[in-house]
Amino acid sequence: MSTTSTRFVAAAKSNAERMFPALTAAQIARVAARGHVRQVQRGEILFDAGVATTGFFVVTGGQIEMVRLSAGAEELVQLFGRGQFTGEMNTLSGRPPLVRARMSESGEVIEMDREHLLALVQTDAEISEIVMRAFIVRRVELIAQGMGDAIVIGSAHCAGTLRAKEFLTRNAHPFTYIDLDRDADVQVVLDHFHVTIADVPIVVCRGELVLRNPSNRQIADCLGLNEAVDSSRVHDLIVVGAGPAGLAASVYAASEGLDVLVLEESSPGGQAGSSFKIENYLGFPTGISGQALAGRAFAQAQKFGAHILIARGAIRFGGERKPYAIEIGESAPVQARAIVVATGAEYRKPLLESLPRFEGIGVYYGATFVEAQLCVGEEVIVIGGGNSAGQAAVFLAQTAKCVYIFVRSDGLAQTMSRYLIRRIEEHPAIVLCTHTEITAVDGEAHLERVLSRNNETGQVANHNIRHVFVMAGATPATKWLGARVALDAKGFIKTGADLSQQELIDARWALSRAPFLLETSLPGVFAAGDVRAGNLKRVAAAVGEGSIAVSFVHRVLEE
Ligand SMILES: Cc1cc2nc3c(=O)[nH]c(=O)nc-3n(C[C@H](O)[C@H](O)[C@H](O)COP(=O)(O)OP(=O)(O)OC[C@H]3O[C@@H](n4cnc5c(N)ncnc54)[C@H](O)[C@@H]3O)c2cc1C
């Protein structure tokens, strides 16, 4: 073996205690009680990168080396000695490992499959804390080092590149990015994979499978982000949407013993996942990024055994009565006895013909680190007067030259929290433009110009600005439900006491009881979070509703 690097080992030194802890003799005995002890020889491969496995190994004798293939050479990632254990977040979710595990010294290991590992972390609080912390910190380090099994080749001027990068980032999947505009050796890379610039974005999975301009679903399938779905199985609960409301419902339902399937059209985290910093969520006095909050909730749902499908949205709601069926595309519909709809809302966009052409290449609907990096030192426009617009402006002003906030009204007082208004007023790089509407966007390969109009004076202005952040509210993602549940005038789902007698008659409500809190006009179908009429449009509200819905799911399942 040619060991070319041990950079993971070096980078991890400061974090070694948390990343590579050794279990005590008593803890090892508790693991052994659930796993099976195996003698292993030097050179034996315990699991391989990209090959589906469910193995978790604790070393009781000898040594395991973790290696990854990089540019044809083996790179040592980490060595594991007595008491130490293999794995990271993929082990918990059942996704293929990112590295190869091989015995570098003969010895003995305790082997445990995923099912038993889940049972262990759900029931042994002490071991759970050690294992979960190590798995999460290892994943964070893999991301920081770009030590994944995916390479994205693309350009900052290509909307598909931004989408692919965001998809991997929001799924916490480590990847390497090669920028066609900046990387001097790019032709060598293109030739190596037999692709051309016209194919971007290109995603290379495990150094061999080359995807040309893939959809998020193709990327997910190629990297093995989803397990196979058993469509004959009737789940206790299907949660549709993995934003804060859906993740909360999944965590509570799975932790309370329900068989839960979660469908997520894009990436876990929903709108909250695109928030740079959530400062008003209980328990985080210095704020937490939406991505971090979503990542933790996702890990928690997996720990309790929720089965989560990524890039697999609900396409159509079928079935007149229980079990309800949901179509998810190519495979057969999935079924459950109860449903929590947590599909949130989609961004509202100005009705400009050319706007979609620049989505991802100058027009954005979220302000995360990925977008912020694209406009360092440049002028940007944020459209909208709500809290999300305010947060985006404050965040972008850290790195942009100037942030213009466009609002149609005469100010922010009616729509934005006072603390954000104060920050905006005090920030020297933020300019509030009242009575201002965007009327056109223009450019060639990237957004270059924005036209605006003052709705009081009629004055038109031309801005040579390359980045516009549209943060102008959202419409509910309820189209897939058809007319199956009662909606309000704006398309949000009506629930509980908000449903009128007439709406229940129209929906042919057949039960002697009234709908439960958060229950829609269809028995056993609940709505939680932003998608629900009357919801507060806050992370805490979504999380609260997701968890409350589960308490009523139990009652429905008993009926
Ligand atoms: C930039 C930004 C910053 C914000 N900052 C804050 C803040 O600081 N504090 C705060 O309290 N709130 C904040 N909010 C609001 C908060 O994020 C939302 O209220 C919250 O995310 C709502 O959660 P949800 O789960 O109901 O919906 P969403 O977060 O919208 O999640 C819905 C999920 O459902 C998925 N989905 C949609 N359709 C389907 C389908 N057919 N099948 C499967 N999945 C589907 C979506 O992909 C998405 O992941 C912010 C919002 C934004 C956009």
Image: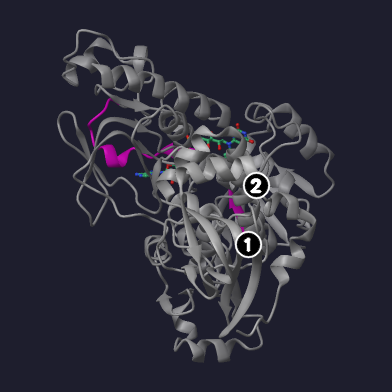
- Identify the residue at image location x=57%, y=91%: 188
Q: Is residue 151 visible?
A: yes
> Position of 345 compared to 514: left or right?
right
Viewport quadrant of the C terminus: top left
Q: Indicate whether residue 257 is drawn in magenta.
A: no
Quarter location, residue 323: top left
Indicate the amino acid at tag 1. Leu
Q: Please name the residue shown 41% across and 60% down the image.
A: 53
Q: Quadrant of residue 408?
A: top right
- Pick the residue in front: 476 or 40: 40
Which residue is tagged 2? 23
Task: Please give the name of the residue rendered at 18% of the width and 44% of the height, measured from the top-left corner.
Answer: 232
The label on residue 142 is 1
Instruction: Decide if residue 155 is in sight here.
Output: no
Q: Is residue 13 left or right of residue 259?
A: right
Check the picture and name the quadrant holding the N terminus: bottom right
Front-lying residue, 344 or 24: 24
Find out whether the residues at labels 2 and 1 contact each other: C-beta distance under 8 Å.
no
Whether 475 is among the magenta residues is: yes
Looking at the picture, which amino acid does disc 2 mark?
A: Leu
Above or below for 143 versus 152? above
Q: Which residues are magenta?
A: 467-486
Q: Position of residue 369 (x, y in %)?
A: 66, 55
Instruction: Determine whether the residue tagged by mark 1 lies in a helix, strand or loop.
Output: helix
